[in-house]
Image (tube, rainbow, N blue to C red):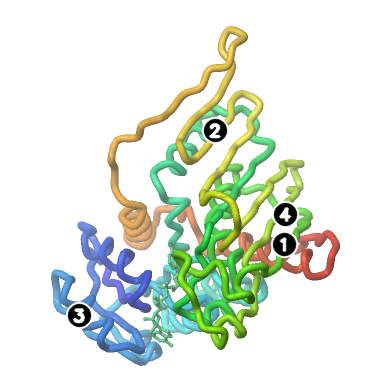
Amino acid sequence: MGTLRVGIVGMGIGRPNGRAFARGARSAVTALCDLDPARMDDFAKELPATVTQFTDFKALCRCDLVDAIFIGTPNQLHVPMALEAVKCGKHVMVTKPLADSGTAARKLVEAQEAAGVVGMMSLSTRFGAECQYLAGQARAGLFGELYYGRARSIRRSGIPDWNTGFIARGGGAFRDMGVHVLDAAWYLLGQPRPATVSGAAGARFGPRGEGYWDFRRVPESFSAQYDSDDYAGGLIRFENGTGLQVESFWACHQPGELQIELFGTAAGATLHPLRTFTTIAGAPHDTTVNLPKGPEPWDRIAEHFTACVLDGVPCDAPLRHGWIVQEMLEALLKSAEQGKEVRLRGLD
Ligand SMILES: NC(=O)c1ccc[n+]([C@@H]2O[C@H](COP(=O)([O-])OP(=O)(O)OC[C@H]3O[C@@H](n4cnc5c(N)ncnc54)[C@H](O)[C@@H]3O)[C@@H](O)[C@H]2O)c1
């Protein structure tokens, strides 16, 4: 196989992912799938080559126009769609979060690994330039032992007001945005095995009709359907003793921020701005890192997936990672609901 032929499902987040595959030297977008033909037509016009359009996902899976499928539909559809793709022998890439439950995520990972196809998460924070820089420094030993992390995604007024189905069925702030910082922080900490999770979560803005995207007003008929968390936070303790504090707010009275802070025995770091902190000659030594403009995260993601399929390169963001992150997410929400710490087991 000289060129990886990719089918893109979901014309929202499918667009940046699809553009990256279309730009790739060894990949091409050959098919699109969405329930909305107008959205597909619109994206098809941007692409360099003709694409076949599908409104029936199963028909896309059965066709021989694609070797791999990118899934960018609402959260609750990721696993059923990826299972179908894997059953048809297609390699899969899934947007975040992998699933809407730990059980569904595990089922998919088992099916994908048994099928012997490549399964990868598309993670724009993990594959961002800053996170990749810190991961490289962690591998090179800059931080010594990384023993603690703090990760947060904070929006001032950012509840999506365009999709009640998402808010009610696919999840809330924690599955939507908490997943980005949780995944990236866990990756940077070296993917330790989670042991216990303790969390607090709730909805303080959405049901009151406040905190929607860019301070927009929504009708009461909309906010009355609000049925998920608009904030969640807690502490994850790993088997090796590492701790990770993680928080996500879709709306709150605090400045907006997406931040990861790393605490290591030899050095620490922040993601935004990208800075490292150490002690030299008995004095604090702080460095601001100005990265040169590099590829977009989507290009790194598409290129890595292509290399995994075409060259057999080991996957740096396998669906298995998506599953373990999902288990941590769900455990935090469960802990908040039950008012007690949750122990995680059986993540092998
Ligand atoms: N940075 C990121 O990685 C990032 C950013 C935004 C969204 N996302 C993820 O992408 C997913 C979709 O979010 P979005 O913002 O693109 O939503 P969206 O509503 O803009 O797009 C979803 C698309 O899926 C289509 N769809 C729904 N059901 C379908 C079906 N059965 N068959 C075919 N198409 C179907 C819809 O018609 C719609 O066009 C979510 O899981 C979200 O978490 C990831």
**Front label number (2 vs 3):** 2
The residue tagged 2 is 269
Tell me the residue at 40%/53% (across/down).
313
Q: Quadrant of residue 171?
A: bottom right
Viewer-proximal residue, 137 or 209?
A: 209
Q: Earlier in the sequence, mark 2 or mark 4?
A: 4
Tell me the residue at 58%/75% (across/down).
209
The residue tagged 3 is 51
Q: Which image quarter has ligand 1?
A: bottom left
Q: Earlier in the sequence, mark 3 or mark 1?
A: 3
Q: Earlier in the sequence, mark 4 or mark 3?
A: 3
Secondary element at image label 2:
strand
The residue tagged 1 is 332
Question: Is residue 241 something that shows in the picture?
Answer: yes
Q: Residue furthest right?
A: 340
Residue 203 image offset from top left, x and y in percent: 67, 69
Viewer-proximal residue, 48 or 37?
A: 37
Amino acid at circle 3: Val
Marks 2/1 in contact by CB < 8 Å: the verdict is no
- Compute the Cα span from label 4 to label 1: 7 Å
Viewer-proximal residue, 347 or 169?
A: 169
Residue 222 image offset from top left, x and y in percent: 54, 84
Amino acid at circle 1: Leu
Marks 4/1 in contact by CB < 8 Å: the verdict is yes
The residue tagged 4 is 234
- Compute the Cα span from label 4 to label 3: 45 Å
Q: Earlier in the sequence, mark 2 or mark 3?
A: 3
